[in-house]
Amino acid sequence: MIEFLKESTFAVNEVIQRAWGITRKHYLSIATLCFLMFLTSSASSLMAFFLNEVSRPLSVLMVFLFILMYFTINLSLLRYIFHLLDNEENDVTIVGTIPTKVQIVRFLIATLYFMMCIIGVYLLVTLVPFPIILLLIKTHVITTQKTIHLISGIFISIGILAIFITWLRISFFPFFILDKGAQPFESIKLSLATTKGNFTKILLLLLVLGGFQLLYLAFSYLHWPIVSFIINVLSSFIIVPLSAVSLTVAYRKMMQEYRGDARPDILHNIV
């Protein structure tokens, strides 16, 4: 176990070092795309708030358009990073990385599959045990309301953990759509297959990248506003661009090491 953690740590260090080199060299372009995503997200919230008083259907339409714009910029960022990883920085511009209509449609459909998987896993983990609980109540094995709440809370906690694990395993689907031209559901299966055996490495990578956010929450809780503000600024201008590059580098590294089927099934890649 110790050797496995050492190997995982070294792999994470390698990913972050390479990502930092790319981010530092092309910081302005990457940060610009990240900033555009931030502006789009903020503008959508404001637009929905103001238009809600005028027309609810118009408000919903504008939110959809802004979400579509946000996803388009996000996919453009990933495509741009792919070009940088392939040493094509001399031949690529930000405008040239705008995703095609096919890629956007596949991404939106895959996102629906993604949400269905998350909801399905949660329902499976949390609802299946309830008939057992009802049986235990009828047979008077469970007799107090406190015990019922305790057991329900345990299964809900397990469901939340299952959501996190599922999210981590299938969240790489956009990379397959952009890099391999995968179909929506195929991208979900490929993400599940390539992350098999890499869960610890991905988790460590996210913990490292999310460390600044955790520090921000900690110092905010301690009521140190100046320190938390400085950490938040560093996180917004450095960690966010670095995170996008790091996840793309991690994807490429997993693909280089992947020895599974080109069309994997779900059952053999769950564990």
Image (tube, grey):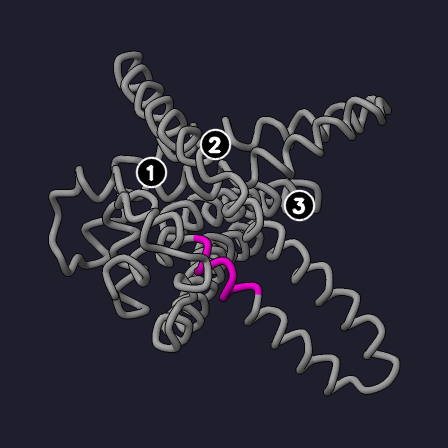
Helix, strand or loop at disc 1?
Answer: helix
User: Is-magenta flag for residue 72?
Assistant: yes
**Which residue corresponds to the image point at 37% horizontal and 44% vertical from the top-left?**
248
- Check residue 24 in the rendering and tell me which mark sits there, or answer none: 2
**How far apart, in angstroms, are the residues tagged by discs 3 and 2?**
51 Å
Q: Residue at x 71, y 33 (%)?
A: 232
Which numbered marker is on residue 250? 1
Residue at 63% across, 37% down: 237
Label 3 Cα neighbours within 10 Å, binned few <14 / some 14-19 / many ≥20:
few
- Range covered by the magenta-colored residues: 70-77
Q: Of 42 and 268, which appears nearest the observer?
A: 42
Is residue 1 toward the left or the right of residue 25 in the image?
left
- Residue 155: in magenta span: no
Asked if residue 122 lies left or right of residue 61, the reply is left
Q: CA distance from mark 2 to mark 1?
A: 17 Å
Secondary element at image label 3: helix
Q: Which residue is mark 3?
A: 149
Q: Residues within 10 Å of mark 1 (few under 14, many from 20)?
A: many
* Amino acid at circle 2: Arg
Q: Position of residue 140 (x, y in %)?
A: 57, 48
Dot 2 falls on a residue whose secondary structure is helix
Residue mark closest to the camera, 2 vs 1: 2
* Front position in the image: 118 or 83: 83
37 is higher (above) or lower (below) than 221: below
Cβ atoms at labels 3 and 2 below 8 Å apart: no
Q: Quadrant of residue 124?
A: bottom left
